[in-house]
């Protein structure tokens, strides 16, 4: 257990926050700090063909130790952390033998991680938790996944009695800003299929995710001295509220779950002369996804008609699509992961991802790629935590998948 803790902490204490406003890959120079460390670590544990390209995509190979043909499988995680909350100066806290009560993350600022609000904490009574100190995110998304993959490869190298085919490992930058797979060389990777270790609660196994788009609505106004503004000023911020209120109020993240889609207003930049609204659009169902985009365009048209002026402009860009379409034809790759969990007495939780993953884009690039739990909870914020036992189980799942794949093709 201590080995996993030490490895995980060595990763999360390196700031790798990505930047959506950057045009480079990786989007921040500091991502190279962990990327270069991972390259050296993969070499140190005995991986073959370890490489890192000009965009910080890392790949490595664990050669087969059987004499029959086995499909090449892969395991993938990302090393950037979300720009939603600071990832600088992460100071992990270790909570041993968790007692099911409130955890004081930061006494000075009265920041409490409480099971009264985060009920999932009670699943982990008696276990060892790693939390934040209340001032940063933790980075379990997805440094827990990286920890698990590296640890599993190290275990397989040190235990050649576990038979497996060729295994590929891939680590990517910029997943949190939707670019993690943009420059991933699927052909170079060379796997028949792969798994992202990027889920949350122990047992999660996912092969459905949102269809996703981003929308920018520009609202144009006209600034005039407020003392002489009657009949002349056009305050774009007031007009922006017309657009906001025209969308279904309950179809937002805080009111939806399961397969329910949403519109999410995540940023406003406003002044009298111009206001910019930034939305993300999400839905598992492709037809409903297209209908959501069409509704936003209709709202813009209707409001411009109502005010008899071209006040509103909209730009919508698709981001990724539901991987289900690409994974279902090769559903056996999900079945192998499910069988591996059951063999380890882990209850599989097969459910749709209410988000995205590198696996979605990779599936459409020709690498079918379901998602497996990495163990963390409350990603992207100060209340993030990960049970060490969940990370240990994820390591075991990786090893078991490799073993089962070899057996099934013997």
Image: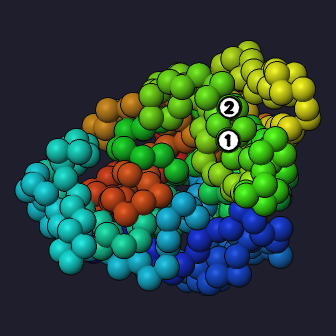
Where is residue 196 drawn, in percent x and y?
A: 58, 49
Res 242 label:
2
Where is residue 57 drawn, in percent x and y?
A: 74, 67
Calculate the distance from the C-alpha at mark 2 to the C-alpha at mark 1: 7 Å
* Left or right, 191 with reference to 94: right
Where is residue 74 drawn, in percent x and y?
A: 64, 51
Give the class, few, some or many, for how many residues have Cα within 10 Å of label 1's Cα (few <14, many ≥20).
Answer: some
Q: Secondary structure at mark 2?
A: helix
Where is residue 398 drawn, in percent x and y?
A: 47, 51
Q: How is the image coloured?
A: rainbow
Residue 308 in which image quadrant = top right
Label 2–label 1 contact, CB within 8 A:
yes
* Left or right, 24 with reference to 9: right
Q: Which residue in the structure is indicated by mark 1? A: 238
Viewer-proximal residue among 10 and 14: 14
Res 122 label:
none
Viewer-proximal residue among 192 and 272: 272
Viewer-proximal residue among 158 and 262: 262
Viewer-proximal residue among 272 and 72: 272
Give the class, few, some or many, for how many residues have Cα within 10 Å of label 2's Cα (few <14, many ≥20).
Answer: few
User: Image height check: is 73 above or below 59?
Assistant: above
Residue 184 seen in this snapshot: no
Quadrant into which the C terminus falls = top right
Residue 282 in which image quadrant = top right
């Amino acid at each position: 257990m201590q080995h996993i803790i030490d490895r995980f902490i060595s990763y999360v204490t390196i700031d790798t926050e990505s930047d959506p406003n950057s045009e480079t890959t990786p989007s921040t120079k500091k991502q190279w700090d962990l990327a270069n460390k991972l390259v050296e670590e993969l070499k140190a544990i005995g991986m073959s063909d370890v490489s890192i390209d000009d965009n910080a995509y890392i790949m490595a190979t664990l050669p087969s130790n059987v004499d029959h043909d086995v499909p090449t499988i892969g395991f993938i995680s990302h090393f950037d952390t979300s720009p939603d909350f600071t990832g600088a100066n992460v100071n992990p806290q270790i909570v041993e033998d968790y007692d099911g009560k409130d955890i004081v993350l930061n006494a000075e600022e009265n920041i409490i991680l409480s099971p009264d609000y985060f009920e999932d904490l009670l699943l982990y009574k008696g276990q060892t938790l790693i939390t934040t100190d209340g001032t940063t995110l933790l980075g379990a998304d997805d440094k827990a996944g990286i920890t698990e993959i590296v640890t599993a490869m190290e275990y397989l190298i040190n235990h050649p009695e576990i038979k497996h085919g060729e295994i590929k490992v891939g680590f990517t930058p910029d997943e949190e800003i939707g670019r993690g797979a943009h420059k991933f060389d699927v052909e170079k990777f060379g796997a028949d299929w792969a798994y992202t270790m990027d889920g949350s609660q122990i047992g999660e196994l996912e092969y459905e995710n949102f269809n996703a788009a981003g929308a920018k609505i520009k609202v144009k106004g006209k600034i005039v001295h407020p003392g002489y503004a009657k009949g002349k000023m056009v305050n774009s911020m007031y007009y922006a509220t017309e657009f906001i209120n025209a969308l279904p109020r309950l179809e937002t993240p805080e009111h939806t779950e399961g397969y329910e889609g949403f519109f999410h207003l995540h940023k406003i930049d406003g002044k009298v002369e111009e206001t910019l609204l930034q939305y993300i659009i999400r839905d598992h169902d492709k037809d409903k996804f297209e209908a959501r985009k069409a509704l936003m365009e209709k709202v813009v048209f209707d409001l411009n008609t109502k005010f008899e002026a071209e006040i509103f402009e909209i730009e919508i860009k698709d981001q990724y699509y539901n991987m289900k379409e690409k994974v279902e034809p090769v559903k056996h790759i999900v079945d192998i992961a499910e069988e591996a969990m059951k063999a380890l007495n882990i209850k599989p939780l097969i459910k749709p991802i209410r988000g995205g993953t590198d696996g979605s884009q990779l599936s459409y690039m020709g690498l079918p790629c379901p998602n497996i739990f990495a163990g963390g909870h409350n990603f992207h914020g100060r209340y993030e935590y990960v049970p060490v036992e969940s990370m240990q189980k994820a390591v075991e799942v990786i090893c078991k998948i490799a073993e089962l794949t070899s057996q099934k093709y013997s």
